[in-house]
Amino acid sequence: MANKPTELSLIENEAQNGYMAYVRTHTAKLAQELGKKPLAFVLTLGCQQNESDSEKLRGMAAAMGYGITDNPKDAHLLIVNTCAIREHAEKRALSLVGQYKHIKTARPEAIIAVCGCMTAQPHRVESLKRSYPYVDILFGTSQLHRFPEFLAAKLRVGKRVLRSDEPEHTVAEDIPVIRESSYRAWVSVMYGCNNFCTYCIVPYVRGRERSRRKENIINEVKALVTEGYRDITLLGQNVNSYGKDLGADYDFADLLAELDKIEGDYLLHFMTSHPKDATRKLVDVMASGKRIAHHFHLPMQSGSDAVLKAMNRRYTFEKYIGIVDYIREKMPDATITSDIIVGFPEESEKDFEDTLNALRRARFDMIYSFIYSPRKGTPAAEMSQISKELQSERFDRLLAVQNEIALVANKPFEGKTVRVLCDGRSKNKEAAITGRTEGGKIVFFDGDDSHEGKFVNVKIERAETFALYGKIEK
Ligand code: SAH
Ligand code: SF4
Ligand code: F3S
């Protein structure tokens, strides 16, 4: 049974508009005292979904009369948008929130809010409530659109606003947004996840799958293309589930095909696609599309069927590699990337070797590899863990194998010309400018600031494991 989400438009929502107006009277008063707008600072930890949420937090802050700053020391409103995917992410979030204590001591009127995936966990809300008394507002991911309400409540009553409610089954539209980039954009097509991979916290902190209506997505992409955006990434934890909760008679491949019809010089990316439901139809749509990047991010996690089963991934390596082979058959130029977890509970030497062999067989252009990190409340955290030493030894071996593969995958680019979307100045001493290919490979090349946000053709002179080096073709 489809469990349809409730759709809410922030622009049309009287209650939230009332809260925004309330905050605006506060910021207007502050602006008079300060002689300039009060400032908001938003720190993002975590994945693209969180970056996208932060763009909305900035948008809402601006709509409530705040200017935006990159410096927490100048801010009157500080928001930390947290991640909970691994222990390290949570530790980092807690340490950063810890550092804001002195800001609050110096300026008690500054407001500190902590939100995102970490604070969607009731036990974290409890511990932050106790150990970080200077945090004013706490809320989870599914309540993002209620930020004006929480801020207004804090300003009006003065008390802390600490929310640890059940995730809401809402799709909020028309949230104001301030995008980081003027040429790369994120567009969520759905929120949440129903898959419950046994290692993963995301279904607990992002709630159940809920899709945006197709018209809303199409309109957003059209507007971005008109504004000159060159690279649009469709986001969802498992985009292949798109539309199921709406009971729609179209799927993600249909949505992609429809978006591809929007006229303009831009690339469409999407992430992430779960191998259990990646279809040939999706690959066919990509192969015949005009603007769909030939880039497939297909997280494998492990090459061992026993581990995949324990992870509840619901595919075998054979099924997985079948999709990889089909992508290569239809799009020989496709870049294929993946995520791998090393040191999952009970992973044997044989299981690990299966993963190494899977890498040799799949020949990914790049992988994101992670050491398994137990997450409170997930089934894998209760399984029998393997030692940290063994985990890190396997992690190093995995990287050594993959680095060789990536270098071999990049070598054929030498002497070729590739189209690159330029990201401006690079920190690399060897080259002034950086950008990415259609498949997301990093390229360093000559050029100047005027190229930023534009497509340029770069002739590759040298290929390395993690990057390509070349010169702009005149
Ligand atoms: N929805 C995406 C993944 C989002 S999380 C998908 O299913 O592909 C991004 C990556 O983080 C995952 O692919 C996984 O490799 C890694 N990850 C998730 N939970 C983890 C954990 N507990 N420990 C280590 N890595 C983890
Ligand atoms: Fe996590 Fe699995 Fe959902 Fe991805 S599909 S977010 S790994 S539970
Ligand atoms: Fe993303 Fe981290 Fe949440 S990876 S979905 S911000 S737990």
Image (cartoon, helix red, strand yellow):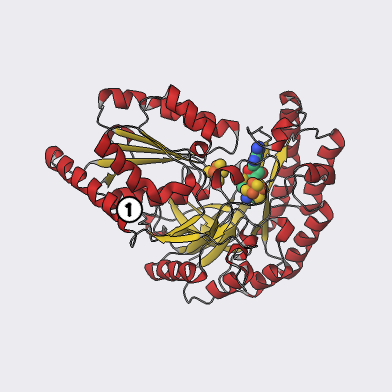
Which x, y percent locates residue 267? 53, 66
Q: Quadrant of ligand 3?
A: top right
Judging from the image, what secondary structure is the residue with disc 1 in?
helix
- Against 258, residue 64 (above or below) is above
Q: Name the quadrant containing residue 395.
A: top right
Instruction: Report the side of 98 relative to 295 (left or right).
Output: left
Q: Residue at x 34, y 59 (%)?
A: 13
- Against 358, residue 223 (above or below) is below
> Which amino acid does the dot numbered 1 rest on?
Gln
- Taking the view exactly as shown, the residue that stands out farthest to the right is 350
Between 447 and 94, the one nearer to me in the picture = 94
Q: Residue at x 78, y 29 (%)?
A: 384
Whether disc 1's CB lies below 8 Å from ligand 3 is answered no
The residue indicated by pointer 1 is 16
Between 23 and 266, the one nearer to me in the picture = 23
Please indicate, yes or no, whether residue 432 appears anywhere in the rendered image: no
Please indicate, yes or no, whether residue 115 appears anywhere in the rendered image: yes
Between 124 and 251, the one nearer to me in the picture = 124
Which x, y percent locates residue 262? 49, 75
